[in-house]
Amino acid sequence: MAKNRSQSESPTDTLTTSSQPNHSPADNVSAMSAADKALVMALQQFNAVADTIGLDDDTRRQLASCQRELIVHFPVRMDNGRLDLFTGFRVHHNTVKGPSKGGIRYHPAVTLDECRALAMWMTWKCSLMNLPYGGAKGGVIVDPKQLSLHELERLTRRYATEISPFIGPERDIPAPDVGTNAQIMAWMMDTYSMHKGYSIPAIITGKPVSIGGTAGREYATGLGVTYITRAVLKQRFGRSLDDIAVAIQGFGNVGSWTARTMHERGARVVAVSDVQGGIYNRRGLDLRQLGHHMDEHKTVVGFPGADPLTNQELLQLDVDVLVPAALEGQIHAENAAGIRAPIIAEGANGPTTPEADAILNDMGVTVIPDILCNAGGVVVSYFEWVQGLQSFFWDESEVRRSMEKTLLDNLDAVVGATVRYKCGLRTAAYTIAISRIVDATRLRGIYP
Ligand code: GLU
């Protein structure tokens, strides 16, 4: 685990509006962390589409930059009485379609560049799903597993306070991401509401249902991955999920709900992993027993009835579907050629580098891109926000039905574009998403 770098940062707050493209030349990419490479990847993907659609230079510079970036340094009183300083970010990539939307990540390796990339991907994801949102992302440099519950609450409430001028139900609506959950969203909502003097549930999505969350948000991303994968399996391979062998890298919210919802539909989840390592059973893992093991040990490692394997070995298993559901850049130029799954369903944001994408494309692997495959989470976040604004709540079956329809209608649009432009699913999805933002940018014009 990387050490918490918050203490080495200077304790000043900066609220900047970018006037320059927010990227430096990628001449030292190999020395960069996976988090920092995310921005290089996001810009490579964007520039490839910009080239294809013949995007003018001015719009290209505008969309390659993030509109607003906030860095905060803040103190938290730890249980032992010490004061620790933490660093957090909140980035709005684009708001041309509406308020910005995106999760908050707690991870020791979070960087500003990573938040920029993730915010940009949120813009494209919301655009592809036709949601009235732009893209945002936030993060705190922290390993939440090292904090007590009280420390986590104090850190969350102070971070929420620091970014509160930057967020709002009509301005920017955060949500869970890696390392955060419904309880953390509850504290953020409560903190924001206390400052305003009344409850504002629509400030955040992914809240517990009892305080204005929506039914079905907890598992939405994983269920969405399952819906989309099932549809692609049927369309391209004429197969159902029944007896399909699946390997899943990452066993957080997205990985574990993908495993469970695929298994419920007949798939055999043969391998899963987390940061500590992976486990494999050719006949399929007993997910109920694995749940008990996780409760006790907080890792999949050591699960009886399965063989150990590394994260790298998991990626190269002979399975029908591979689901990278961990962090960015996990499938790259060095390991892509060893992938044996004919379908990669991107549960994570940015798990495949553009170099790996090209290799997989040549190999004939179907890659279901992140902004399509894992969009169930933000789609249900949108439903939660709408319900909160209207104070009128839907039942779970309506949420699921509406999510499935949104995802499958957009899958059809992407598949249609692969035929029209003779390209893969990623190029089609990104081209649709980016073209819509380009059109909206032109229609709105430039103020003043
Ligand atoms: N963090 C999730 C994502 O990357 C959800 C974002 C949201 O619901 O706003 O899509």
Image: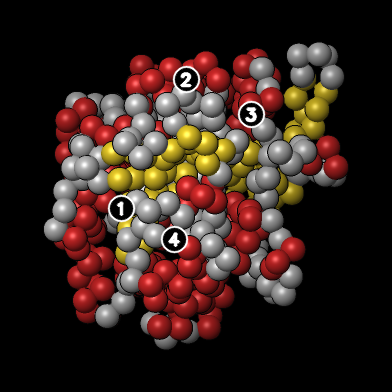
Helix, strand or loop at mark 3: helix
Helix, strand or loop at mark 4: loop
**Among numbered discs 3 and 4, the one appearing first in the sequence:** 3
Looking at the image, residue 4 sits to the left or right of residue 272; the answer is right
**Position in image of residue 439 (x %, y %):** 35, 72
- Residue type marked 3: Pro
**Among numbered discs 1 and 2, the one appearing first in the sequence:** 2
Give the residue at mark 2. 293
In front: mark 3 or mark 2? 2
Give the residue at mark 3. 144
Q: Residue drawn at (52%, 71%), measured in percent from left and top? A: 355
**Position in image of residue 388 (x %, y %):** 33, 30
| Marks 3 and 2, how far apart at CA | 20 Å
Helix, strand or loop at mark 2: helix
Query: Pointer 2: residues within 10 angstroms few (<14), some, or many (20+)?
Result: some
- Residue type marked 4: Ile
**Among numbered discs 3 and 1, the one appearing first in the sequence:** 3
| Marks 1 and 2, how far apart at CA | 26 Å
Q: Residue drawn at (38%, 53%), measured in percent from left and top? A: 318
Q: Is mark 3 within 8 Å of ligand 1?
A: no
Give the residue at mark 1. 320
Which image quarter: residue 366? Answer: bottom left
Q: Is mark 2 within 8 Å of ligand 1?
A: no
Numbered tag placed on residue 339 in the rendering: 4
